[in-house]
Amino acid sequence: MTSKWDSGHSCAVLSLAISEQRIVASGAECGELTIWSEQGHPIGKLNFHGEDDVTGIVFSPASPTKLYASHGETVSVMDTRVFTKPVESFSISKEEINCISVNELDSLLAAADDSGAVKVLDLQTKNVCRTLQRHTNICSAVAFRPSRPQSLVSCGLDMQVMLWNMQKTRPLWITNLQHLAQDEEDMENHQSPGQLFNPPLAHSLSVSSCGNVFCCGAEDGKIRLFRISGTRFEEELCFKAHTQGVSQVSFFGQNPGKNLLLSGGNDGRVCLWDIGKDTTQPQKQKRNSRRSSSNAKIRQMAEVAPKVSSKLSFEHGEKVNWILGAELQGNKVVLVADPSSSISMYQLGEL
């Protein structure tokens, strides 16, 4: 069952978020920001001065009426109870911001921008306390880890995924998706290293509720799942999810031992994946050369990938700009933003 949320925007919707009180927020092109009731009715609208696209929005984990939004090089703070103008605004970047994340203490806000930097704003002092600069191309996504307010992950169009800690200005660990993709293709095709025709530019990422598992969606249509251990992370699962780039990934729900993952692609498809324990159990490997160990890991992932089941898959028909799983009016739903001015809501029923 599908329904449309209309009359909230006049431009393409780019970003979505939901509060603990089930207030939904949506950001769009031309500086449009709207909040909705869980019934899908607009209850507040505003336009940011300058009309820069609203590329990222997130509710405060500590104060559900506080909403952060990135537009252009600025992050603004809104109060959903008095939704007329920003409470305050911070100009924290010299380039357009693509994604924002707030840690669970509501003490730090991270903003990923076009320069490849992640700017970290101290929400108490109102100052940028860290500039994490290691991506060599656009930084497309950033996310704090649950239960670890000083730790975050980022990814970018340089095909790199990074793990950071706020105590350091350099990443703790870096993985290059191009190298992973080349190894995967070489193993699948049993051939010598060749050229990747569809490089895995990293578009999106999502961290699970446990904080130790995160996934990344890339231009090659694959979703890669990583497990963090201490100061490093390792690829644990890789599977083909879409025929074109994976524009959005988002963990859905917090059921113990049951990892449900939403994905949306440039192919216009929306999928719900079951990546439970049977597909993500760490397996011990014999100590061997680094290359043979890497090959063994790739073979293991190739064997596990078919076990990843799509619990739901449907044609949305438009490129997915943002995807959000939620429970509204007692029903599990998926909200999808695309190049239109409407938000699509899909009923999931019993999962």
Image: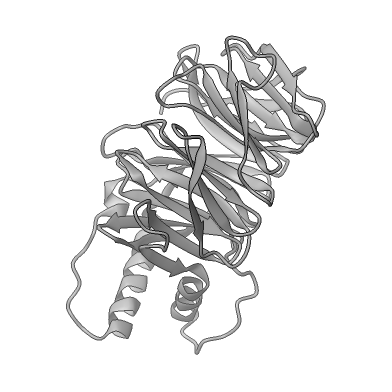
- Looking at the rendering, which quadrant does residue 251 occupy? top left
- x then y, percent, for residue 51: 80, 33
Seen from the viewer's position, the closer of residues 263 and 171 is: 171
Q: Residue at x 57, y 9 (%)?
A: 81
Residue at 54% in and 32% down: 324
Number of numbered discs overlaid on the protein picture: 0
Residue at left 36%, top 31%? 105
In the rendered structure, the answer to whether residue 320 lies left or right of residue 326 reads right
Vertical position of residue 33 compared to residue 42: above or below? below
127 is higher (above) or lower (below) than 134: above
Q: Is residue 333 left or right of residue 149?
A: right
Query: Can the viewer see residue 118 in this picture?
Result: yes
Which quadrant is the C terminus positioned in?
top left
* Vertical comparison of 243 with 129: above or below: below
User: In this orientation, which residue lies closer to the viewer: 172 or 304?
Assistant: 172
Quadrant of image for the N terminus: top right
- x, y percentage for residue 244? 65, 57
Q: Nearer the viewer, residue 98 or 244?
A: 98
- Residue at 54% across, 16% down: 23
In the displayed structure, would residue 321 be above or below residue 32?
below
Q: Position of residue 86 (x, y in %)?
A: 65, 22
Place residue 11 in its image quadrant.
Answer: top right
Residue 334 seen from this side: no
